[in-house]
Image: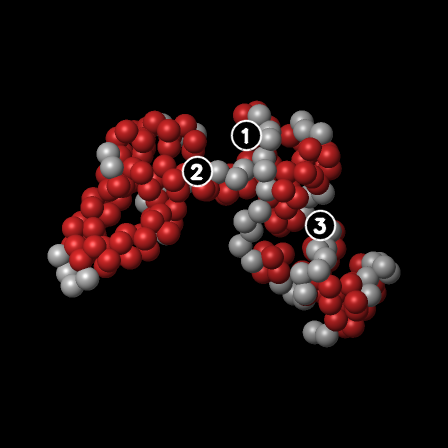
Amino acid sequence: MAPGHVAHGLRASYGMGHITPDTVTAWERGLAAPSPPELTALAAVLWCEPTQLIGTPRGLREHRLVRGYAAADVARTIGMDVATYETAERTGVWSGDARQSAALASVLGLTPRDRLTVMGHDARLAELLGEAVATRWQAHSRAIAKLIGIERRALEEPLRTMHQEYQRLMAATLSRAGGAAASGEQGRIYLERILDHFWSRMPDR
């Protein structure tokens, strides 16, 4: 549908007289974003789900929009000042305490992986996992468990398996042509995808 048709549908069916073709064009180009009510109406006009318009939600704002909540409503529900919450959405830096973090995960239906992402902990987890597969995984299990918020024993099998994979990969590539150079490249690729390797081994997370 052309921007004009979409804008007309939003005005005629949902009473959104402020929506113009230029508004829709700005949404398409990523220059602006619809509010939760606008997103819901837009999805209805286009006969799709909100998630199809946003894609896989990654940031805090995307998760909120998919749920159809206003920022102020989420902030009040989790017991956080609205301005502080909006800053977290804008900057990607989460400053909530443990209770607020748990409430946020519940309100937005966040998986443990989603929660770590929206709270800005992906880089730290990747760092810890990289150290675990390259050295002794047991030495890093406590820090990983604390960061994710699960029991250490739940990490034993995933970390042991990943450690074995990485060490086999490094040993195999060192014996091929290219030696250390090939080993380094294969190791780099594995580490770049280490979060995917980890979460795929924790399907219930």
Question: Pointer 2: what residue?
Answer: 124
From the image, which quarter does the N terminus lie in?
bottom right
Q: Look at 56% across and 51% down and name the residue there.
A: 57
Question: Pointer 1: what residue?
Answer: 102
Q: Nearer the viewer, residue 136 or 49?
A: 136
The spot of residue 137 in percent (x, y) is 26, 35
Taking 198 as reference, is 148 left or right?
A: right
The spot of residue 176 in percent (x, y) is 15, 61
Question: Mark 3 and mark 1: span between their CA atoms?
Answer: 22 Å
Q: Secondary structure at mark 3?
A: helix
Label of residue 62 in the image: none
Question: Pointer 3: what residue?
Answer: 36
The spot of residue 204 in percent (x, y) is 39, 41
Mark 1 residue crowding within 10 angstroms, few (<14) / some (14–19) / many (20+)? some
Mark 2 residue crowding within 10 angstroms, few (<14) / some (14–19) / many (20+)? few
Question: Mark 3 and mark 2: span between their CA atoms?
Answer: 31 Å
Question: Marks 3 and 1: CB-CB under 8 Å?
Answer: no
Q: Secondary structure at mark 2?
A: helix
Under mark 3, the amino acid is Pro
Q: Quadrant of residue 73?
A: top right
Question: Marks 2 and 1: CB-CB under 8 Å?
Answer: no
Under mark 1, the amino acid is Ala
Mark 3 residue crowding within 10 angstroms, few (<14) / some (14–19) / many (20+)? some
> In this picture, is 181 found above or below 191?
below
